[in-house]
Amino acid sequence: MRWARAAGRGLLVLVVLLSGYVFAGARADVPGTGRGPLTLATAGDLTGYLGSLLAGWNRTHPGEKVTLVELPDSTDETRAQMETDLRGEDRGRFDVLNIDVDWTSQFAAAGWIRPLPRERFPLRDFLPPVVGTATYEGRLYAVPYVTNAGLLLYRKDVLAKEGLPPPRTWAELERDARTVAPKYGLDGYAGQLAPYEGLTVNAAEAVYSAGGTILGDEGKRVTVDSAAAREGIDFLVRGVREGWIPKQALTYTEEESKQAFEDGHLLFLRNWPYAYVAANGAGSAVAGEVGAVRLPGPDGPGTSVLGGSNLAVTAHTRHPDSAERLIAYLTSEPVQRQVLTRGALPPVRAALYDDPALVRRFPYLPALRAAVLSAAPRPKSPRYDQVSLVVQAVVHDALTGRQTPAAAVRCLARELAAVTER
């Protein structure tokens, strides 16, 4: 997901930050205070907002300055580099990690991040679903920083010419993608269907929208073998087979799919909100002609995967007090407002979604708020990286015709059971 590519991608932008924080006037590295310079980690800052945001912090906290370090844009590569560092001998290099919401359980179970005191953070001011992404076995191990939910971007101009509203159901989406798009020289619908983390998200959204699940009991139980899961996977497979999902979409990540939409090649696109901002921005061939609504489902609005990123404190930090203070700063209302206005990333604070000025500037906010409130997390598991790899491989085999949706779901059940039993 783009965490901040998305963010939550979207990011879904994953960003690796190296950061330090103290109150004004505090001295760096004071023994016994838990304060001093920090490192904070995330994936590439695609919108370039973090430098100026952290510069404000550094001006008022000279004793604990934040240093920004960016890892690769790819979610999978960022996680691999973080894990390498956390497992290595020099495990004190990072203090604060900006991690994908679905890594919290894995990092907590591995002992890489430390529990946090709930009372130190304004959790009651956040959109309720996002707090659940920061817990593991009932304890808070991170603090939500950016949230995200997939939206359906559509060409307003094309649907207006046809006298059609944006689709609310899969049947409406299929009809318009199959019949309307070709009239305007467009492909119908695309998501992120390359074999990487984005495919796990797209597959999970299809399964959830049909009423299914993948894992239960914090990853201890496999629940994917169901009629709902078969229906969800079949929706995607059918689209590729019938051609209203172009085969090129099997190579798309967030960026490739966003570019195809911006270049005017698609009628519909599933992506994170940052893609809406980009598609309506300078340089886009469809600027001013893009709308966004909740993802469709079988009988009405579907279920998005909850994206975004959480801030966690590493288990080996020498400055836990500074780390927690930095997180409190980054989740404060003024900074969260800048996360949206400068970074085009969805904030976690609920009140910002009702701000009239922000809604005028970001018209997708009401749809995004509804999507987040009805969203579901990716399957929680201390072995999430392995779970995701299984989903990617099996679903991609189904999309390329190597196995039927029914066979794919049976295969998912077997292989996920093997992962959870290790």
Image: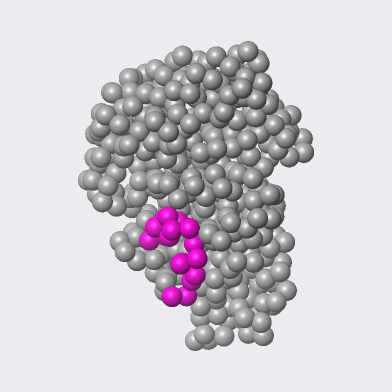
Q: Residue at x 60, y 66 (%)?
A: 333
Segment colored magenta: 119-135
- The residue sitting at the front extreme is 163
Q: Nearer the viewer, residue 381 or 202?
A: 202
User: Is 253 displayed left or right of 227 in the figure?
Assistant: right
**Among the 4 quarters of the image, the one containing residue 138:** bottom left
**Color style of the picture:** one colour
Q: Quadrant of residue 286?
A: top right
Q: Is residue 412 left or right of residue 94?
A: left
Is residue 316 positioned above or below 265 on the image? below
| Residue 37 drawn at (x, y percent) | 60, 74
Task: Pick the residue in front: 351 or 136.
Answer: 351
Residue at 70% over, 38% down: 280
Residue 132 falls within the magenta-colored stretch: yes
Residue positioned 64% across, 60% down in the render: 337
**Is 146 or 286 nearer to us in this picture?**
286
Image x and y of residue 227, in percent: 27, 29
In the image, what residue occupies the spot 31% across and 37% down?
212
Q: From this view, report whether residue 110 is shown above or below residue 1.
A: below
Observer able to see residue 94 = no
- Does the magenta run of residues contain 63? no
The x and y percentages for residue 62 are 69, 77
How many numbered discs sit on the rendered protein? 0
